[in-house]
Image (spheres, helix red, strand yellow):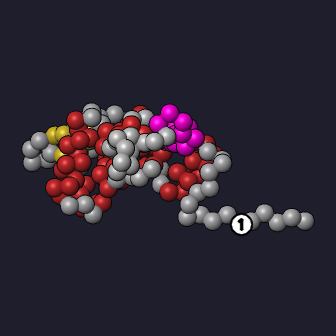
Amino acid sequence: MKITATEEYGLRCMLQLALHHGRTVSLTDLAAAEGIALPFAAKVLLRLRKAGLVVAARGRHGGYQLAEPPARVTVLRVLEALGKPLFDTNFCREHGSPHLDSCMRLTDCSLRPVWAQLDALLRQFFTQTTLADLASGERFTSDHLRQRWPLFAVVGRPTAPAVER
């Protein structure tokens, strides 16, 4: 799985709007807050608006707001609005080798269920993570995700090895 720049910065813009929920935030302020070029921010927000995730206000005090409360906007909805599916079942049919039109393992592939299971797990994870979760700050988000998903180690926060006695 690869998160594109569009998905990353779109999610960051959505997080900025969640942090300022109920207020209109200008495109200039959103771009500056995340260090994004203004044309790129405009492109990302246009896609988010077309997906119904943000509403735009025109005029001197124009900008963007979330279309729904942060607790109702999942990370999955944002990612889907900005990019391709995490695992596309058509991938195998469309990506072959230079000598084949599709994958030579199209009928019997032991990797396909691995990618499908990973896709299902990530979809569940992203569906259960909202902008409200992310807007609560890194420590809260980390603790919240660790409680909800105890099998996942949190990157950036090393855990001490268990000591046997």
Report x, y in % for residue 59: 9, 44
Q: Amino acid at mark 1?
A: Ala
Question: Relative to the observer, which residue lies in front, 121 or 70?
Answer: 121
Q: Residue furthest front?
A: 99
Residue at label 1? 160
Image position of 161 with respect to 109: above or below = below
In terms of image quadrants, where is residue 153?
bottom right
Q: Is residue 148 visible?
A: yes
Residue at image location 26% in from the left, 41% down from the top: 48
Look at the image and tell me in which quarter the C terminus lies. bottom right
- As for residue 13 lying within the magenta part, the answer is no
In the rendered image, residue 94, in percent from the top left (x then y), is placed at 35, 40
- In this rendering, does residue 124 appear at all? no
Magenta span of residues: 106-122
Query: Which quadrant of the structure image shows residue 159?
Result: bottom right
Which residue appears at 63% of the width and 65% of the height?
Answer: 158
Of residue 153 and residue 119, the one placed in the foreground of this image is 119
Q: Is residue 49 left or right of residue 77?
A: left
Q: Is residue 21 left or right of residue 164?
A: left
Which residue is painted at 27% across and 34% down in the image? 51
> As rendered, which of 110 and 28 lies closer to the eye?
110
